[in-house]
Image (spheres, rainbow, N blue to C red):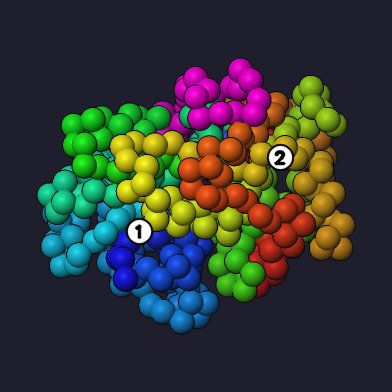
């Protein structure tokens, strides 16, 4: 049974990925300091999967502690989710972002090198494409970033590419996520952002549940189907399965490889909101406000590379996304 070390495994995408790793027959070691997550998600994983995660409550930036963990296990691969992820906060606290997100990556890479672990999957983002020059976004689209969060993703991609050049035995997959939403069917896992949510789906859920008064729709004057921003929303369970496909195929696709993980479909803010209201039969008050600085009009993925090389394709649609998001929100109260 291959053992996968998941850094940042207690978070939203990490916890869903651990469930799918267990389903695929892997053993899992989780390293997380719960700085933006809680141990409850690991208890939920145990309920869902009937298996328990080997947990190390550690900051992934702590290289000595990581080396210690690596020396206690035979690790077949690493999935790296550990990092701060709020765009606005990264603009206000850039050094905190650079220190944490880059340090955690360097620590993990050093531990991998020291212990001859050659398989790494990194949680990147479609944010590295900057403003789209063409759609759908292929993996070859030029890269740029407009904030420290995006810069971290871009720098880390470069670090991992350099690591592969210097160490030809390394197999690394950079997974560029589009907009992950939704939750596990059990409603035991979900996205629970601290404070006011930045992202659309958690904001919709909290407004529907009465925690927020009104959803602000950031602009309805974009050149899109209805004037509101269009994104490629992907169900987190599909995304999690994408990680399992990537880790299983690393050896077949050697070197540093990049994959978009999206559905290839664009959905506007108002389309997502209407689907949420219709499917869940709840009211979500909203008003249109000005555009959010830094937002692009539309963005969706070219998905053929992941399909061809990983044999992976997103299967769940908007209905499943809005339904599971709402069930997890109701269950979190
Ligand atoms: C955002 C980040 C991106 C990051 C991703 C992680 C920005 C500019 N981009 O992507 O770097 O990788 O999250 O999940 O923050 N919207 C509203 N009202 C809201 C919230 C959002 O109308 O309260 C709209 C936005 O204008 C956008 C769409 O909903 O059109 C999706 O927004 P969001 O969920 O924040 O994701 P992104 O901006 O695509």
Q: Give whichever of 285, 329 is nearer the camera.
A: 329
Residue at the image point whose x is 45% and y is 57% from the top: 244
Q: CA distance from mark 2 to mark 1?
A: 29 Å
The answer to whether residue 144 is magenta is yes
Percent from the top left, x then y, of residue 144? Answer: 47, 22
Query: Does 198 sit left or right of 41 as displayed?
Result: right
Q: Nearer the viewer, residue 130 or 192?
A: 130
Q: Is residue 283 visible?
A: no
Mark toward the viewer: 2 or 1: 2
Using the image as rendered, state which of residue 195 and residue 255 is in the foreground.
Answer: 255
Q: Quadrant of residue 303?
A: top right
| Residue at 24 percent of width and 61 percent of height | 75
**Image quarter of residue 94:** top left
**Is residue 329 at least partly visible in the picture?**
yes
What is the number of the mark on residue 283?
none
Q: Is residue 199 left or right of residue 107?
A: right
Q: What secondary structure is found at the residue carrying circle 2? A: loop
The residue drawn where x is 60% and y is 43% is: 262
Q: Quadrant of ligand 1?
A: top right
Please name the residue that numbered disc 1 is placed on.
Answer: 6
The kind of secondary structure the magenta stretch mainly shows is loop
Highlighted range, magenta: 130-153
Task: Name the residue that disc number 2 marks.
Answer: 265
């Amino acid at each position: 049974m291959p053992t996968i070390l998941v850094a940042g495994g207690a978070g939203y995408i990490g916890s869903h990925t651990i469930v799918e790793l267990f389903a695929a027959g892997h053993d899992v070691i989780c390293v997380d300091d719960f700085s933006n997550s809680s141990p409850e998600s690991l208890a939920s994983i145990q309920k869902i999967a009937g298996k328990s995660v080997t947990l190390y409550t550690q900051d992934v930036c702590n290289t000595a502690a990581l080396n210690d963990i690596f020396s206690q296990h035979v690790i077949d691969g690493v999935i790296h989710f550990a990092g701060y992820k709020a765009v606005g906060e990264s603009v206000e606290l850039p050094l905190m972002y650079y220190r944490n997100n880059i340090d955690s990556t360097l620590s993990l890479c050093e531990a991998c090198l020291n212990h001859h672990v050659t398989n790494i999957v990194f949680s990147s983002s479609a944010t590295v494409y900057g403003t789209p020059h063409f759609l759908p976004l292929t993996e070859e689209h030029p890269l740029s970033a407009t904030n420290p969060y995006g810069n971290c993703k871009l720098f880390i991609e470069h670090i991992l590419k350099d690591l592969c050049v210097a160490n030809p035995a390394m197999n690394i997959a950079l997974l560029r996520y589009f907009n992950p939403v939704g939750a596990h069917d059990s409603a035991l896992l979900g996205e629970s952002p601290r404070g006011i949510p930045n992202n659309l789906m958690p904001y919709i859920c909290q407004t529907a549940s009465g925690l927020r008064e009104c959803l602000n729709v950031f602009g309805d004057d974009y050149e899109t189907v209805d004037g509101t921003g269009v994104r490629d929303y992907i169900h987190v369970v599909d995304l999690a399965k994408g990680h399992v496909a990537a880790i299983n195929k690393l050896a077949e696709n050697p070197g540093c490889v990049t994959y978009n993980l999206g559905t290839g479909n664009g959905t506007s803010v108002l389309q997502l909101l209407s689907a949420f209201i219709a499917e869940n039969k709840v009211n979500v008050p909203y008003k249109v406000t000005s555009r959010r600085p830094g937002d692009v009009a539309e963005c969706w993925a070219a998905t053929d590379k992941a399909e061809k090389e990983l044999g992976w394709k997103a299967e769940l649609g908007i209905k499943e996304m809005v339904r599971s998001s709402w069930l997890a929100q109701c269950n979190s109260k």
